Amino acid sequence: MTDTTAPSLWLSLPEGFTDIDLAEDPGDRMCRIVDGLDALTDAGPEQKLGIAVSAELALQAQLREGAVHISNCLVQTEEGAIVQGVFSLFLREQEQGAPGGYPQRAARELAAAWPDADVAVLDFPLGRAAVTVRDLSVPVPGTAYGLPGSGVARVRQLEALFAHPWSPHVLAVVFTTQHPDYWDGWSVLVGAAIGGISFHPPRDDTRDALPPERQDNIRKAFG
């Protein structure tokens, strides 16, 4: 169910991240990914189709979980290989507990739930977040995409959880890729993408355009 009370977010994503129209036909999305790969690489059609299918599978999984934003990221490595990832945002209404204590509490819960994951509390321009990185097995229904049989794909997923500063919501930032060998590069790119998220509108917006919770009530009342 869509949370109609969820607050707004503002994004400024780095080069390589392309917003995805969540209402678009999946077949059209995959065709556009393949077309984009044609401009980047001379890889064979099977490799391009595999990348497009992986991107769509990851996207569908995020949509089932209620994503409010999804971007596809295609990067060409120094060796000329094409690597792909999916960057998603979720806003979930959730009890945050004591002010300022959410990241530490969430990190403890994540470490208990996923003992094999790497869990830490990290600082970003957006605020402090509980961050986890783990490897997952994802079913691949190949027949649904015109491929023979089904299988299991191994993916690496990063999730960063931020307490929203003035509403009872948690922002979950999720990045998923089937190319963990490029993880050092992904870490830099995902960090830059998280740095482009804001709970506030751009600075050149007028004060009246800010959400009511962010307006300067004292100045407004006393001039």
Image: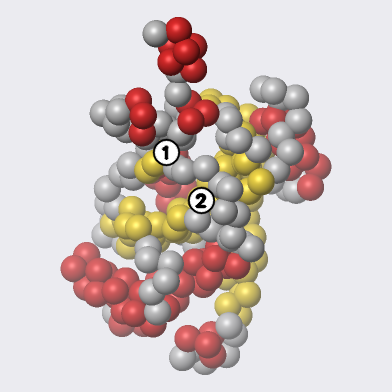
The C terminus lies in quadrant: top left
The N terminus lies in quadrant: bottom right
Residue at the extreme top: 222
The spot of residue 23 in percent (x, y) is: 42, 71
213 with respect to 32 (left or right): right
Q: How many residues crowd around disc 2 within 10 Å: few (fewer than 14), some, or many (20 or more)?
A: many
Locate residue 82: give its quadrant.
bottom left
Given residues 79 and 112, the one toward you in this image is 112
Identify the amino acid type marked 2. Leu
Identify the amino acid type marked 1. Ile
Res 3 seen here: yes
Given residues 142 and 8, the one toward you in this image is 8
Kindly state the secondary structure of the residue where label 2 is placed: strand
Kindly state the secondary structure of the residue where label 1 is placed: strand
Q: How many residues crowd around disc 1 within 10 Å: few (fewer than 14), some, or many (20 or more)?
A: some
Residue at the extreme right: 112
Residue tagged by mark 2? 89
Q: Is residue 80 above or below residue 8?
A: below
107 with respect to 143 (left or right): right
For the residues labelled 2 and 1, say whether their Cβ atoms are less than 8 Å apart: yes
Residue tagged by mark 1? 197
Q: What colour scheme governs how the chains and residues are painted in the rendered image of this protein? A: secondary structure
Tell me what residue is drawn at x 40 percent, y 57 percent: 71
80 with respect to 152 (left or right): left
Q: Is residue 154 above or below residue 182?
A: below
Locate residue 24: give its quadrant.
bottom left
The spot of residue 198 in percent (x, y) is: 43, 35
The spot of residue 5 in percent (x, y) is: 58, 48
- Mark identifier at residue 45: none
The spot of residue 36 in percent (x, y) is: 25, 69
